[in-house]
Image: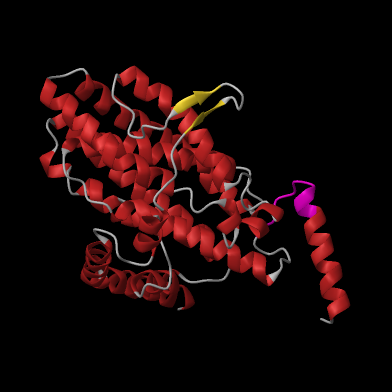
Amino acid sequence: MDNNETAAQEEKFQQRVDNEEKIEPKDWMPDEYRKNLIRQISQHAHSEIIGMQPEGNWITRAPSLRRKAVLLAKVQDEGGHGLYLYSAAETLGITRADMIDALQTGKAKYASIFNYPTLSWADIGAIGWLVDGAAICNQISLQRTSYGPYARSMVRICKEESFHQRQGYEIMVVLAQGSEEQKKMAQDSLNRWWWPSLMMFGPHDSESAHSAKSMRWKIKRETNDDLRQKFIDQTVPQIDFLELEYPDPEIKWNEGRGHYDSGELDWEEFYAVIKGDGHCNRERIQHHVKAHEEGEWVRQALHAYNDKKRARKVA
């Protein structure tokens, strides 16, 4: 295909995107669009899978049978989300094995938030409320992303994440209305998870390497800074309801803007965690590698079974 034909294809493709038509796996798409999608969807899938670790660590230590059952269901949901997203990415021509290899070798990233430790039961509440709340802000708009398989996978994921957020906030309500020690636990968790949750939206739009193209192709529907502001605006009243102190002393309502003002994030910390220098970066990948290696026999057995099924059909 010469340059003129490629330009015509790209123009036609952009018209489809602008007209809100969904792009499907067998449709023509620019190579950069495909690469951008693979990067974003696989990173999203990795985040769901790695994100099982900090909460899974508390399943055996949950304070009641009800809490244990709810947390177990939540962690199981996250594994399912990873499955949907890996499957969506595979429609773009990349294999599951290649994506997992990229994760384990450090070529692919996942959400920086999951490199922070869970130090108390209150952290499980803060993760559900803040981390999943931040995820929902981003993922609701992804239900309208331009790539069909990704958009459709987000419908169920968003419904389940909504449950996860309510589960987390309910834990925080109970703690905030409990004993003085429980309220201190809730406040401590809010203080530690607030800033990493805001970092989940990524760098400022002016410093984001992928935002401009992602917005033009409608892979992303809202900018990092707009999503971060939306999260702050919806979460501050929830902090007020809990009667906890703001984790950011600069939070205040700005009547002129119609939004809450807030302090600047520690971007040095953000980039350090992204580069592998967070509290739990090495621990998270080591655990993933160990689990992957221990599950090799299951994958081999599945392949052998499928080979036998195919052989019987041929015979």
Q: Residue at x 38, y 23 (%)?
A: 238
Q: Quadrant of residue 247?
A: top left
Q: Quadrant of the C terminus?
A: bottom left
Q: Is residue 40 left or right of residue 83?
A: right
Q: Position of residue 21 (x, y in %)?
A: 75, 49
Q: Quadrant of residue 188?
A: top left
Q: Quadrant of residue 181?
A: top left
Vertical relation: 69 (above or below) 170: below
Q: Is residue 23 magenta?
A: yes
Q: Position of residue 74 (x, y in %)?
A: 30, 40
Task: Farthest residue to the bottom: give it.
Answer: 2
Q: Is residue 152 magenta?
A: no
Vertical relation: 156 (above or below) 212: above
Q: Position of residue 92 (x, y in %)?
A: 58, 66
Q: Quadrant of the N terminus?
A: bottom right
Q: Give the prevailing secondary structure in the magenta stretch.
A: loop
Q: Residue at x 57, y 21 (%)?
A: 255
Q: Position of residue 295 (x, y in %)?
A: 24, 68
Residues rendered magenta in the picture: 16-24
Vertical relation: 44 (above or below) 63: below
Would residue 160 be seen by someone viewing this image from the given angle? no
Q: Residue at x 28, y 66 (%)?
A: 285
